[in-house]
Image (tube, rainbow, N blue to C red):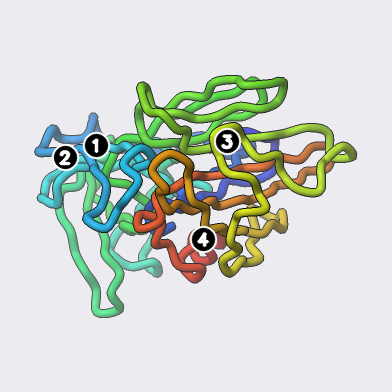
Amino acid sequence: MALLGVGIGLVVFRPWDHHVAISLSGSQTSSLGQAIGSPSAGPTKSVTPSAGGKCPDIVVHKTEQLHVIPRGGWVHASDGVNVRAAPSSSAARLTTLATGTALTLQAEQTNPDGSTWYRIRLSDGRDGWLSSRFTTNYPISLASTDSLKIWLPDGYQFHTIAPENAEARYAGAPLALLYVQSGARDQAPVEAAVPAGLPNRSTWTARPAEQVLVGDLPAIDHVFGVTLAGGGCPALVHEVRITTATRYYDFLFLLDAPSSHVSHDDVMEALRS
């Protein structure tokens, strides 16, 4: 969740997992209901680069729950997730859980339309269902700068590298996952400055870009292929600029190319949800 000001809205963009991780939040992010307890302790695995990955230094670090029931989960959704009386988006809404809410997934159902739903127990004893699209199977937490907060996989923290410039890095990792640059809207550069450690922008290879809406704010997800110095690793940069009434925010995600398999349809669906 990136806290950019009241009323902007909450949106999720996760380029590393088929939807990742800008969430823009306003004042409506408090939970309207609670799930019971903490996620059930279960088998986990530390994610490593995919078999085709050539850049282990930029793998997204996260500790995933293995696909068993029961298991833990976490809400990561625009404006929270609705918990319903049955595994259907048309079923009665029981409550809404905020981004970051820890869950114990007690049952799983896949419907004929391909959607998957999880059953949870609410604090008032009722059983409810929520869509798997709005959850992660790894813990997330808030990483903060002076001006914003973003939900990222556990272990990532921001470090200030210059005034209004920060990077989110996993402890001990040689490269950052996310670079954020911000400033007054009337001082926004034509394009984001290239962070130290990335190749010159003139060497970036443009991939297809998409118009997206972040809340009510128009933005473009620019995707570039890059080759990192040192080992010649192929990687992808996702570059998104968010502009509010008074400020701009440039987000640059650095991902292992085989790990960044998000399709534009997935990004659009996640941003519009």
Residue positioned most to the right: 186
Three-letter code, disc 3:
Tyr
Three-letter code, disc 2:
Lys
Relative image position of residue 250 (x, y in whole percent)? 67, 42
Specify whether 266 is left or right of 124. Answer: right
Q: Secondary structure at mark 1?
A: strand
| First in residue order: circle 2 vs circle 1 | 2
Observer-nearest of 7 and 157? 157
Q: Are marks 2 and 3 in contact (CB under 8 Å)?
A: no
Residue on which disc 4 sits:
273
At label 1, counting other C-alpha atoms closer than 10 Å, the crowd grade (few under 14, some 14-19, many 20 or more) is: some
| First in residue order: circle 3 vs circle 4 | 3
Q: Secondary structure at mark 2?
A: strand
Tag in front: 1 or 3: 3
Specify whether 257 is left or right of 184. Answer: left
Label 2 – label 1 distance at C-alpha: 6 Å
Say the numbered circle drawn on residue 179: 3
Three-letter code, disc 1:
Thr
Say the numbered circle drawn on residue 45: 2
Label 1 – label 3 distance at C-alpha: 22 Å
Residue on which disc 1 sits:
63
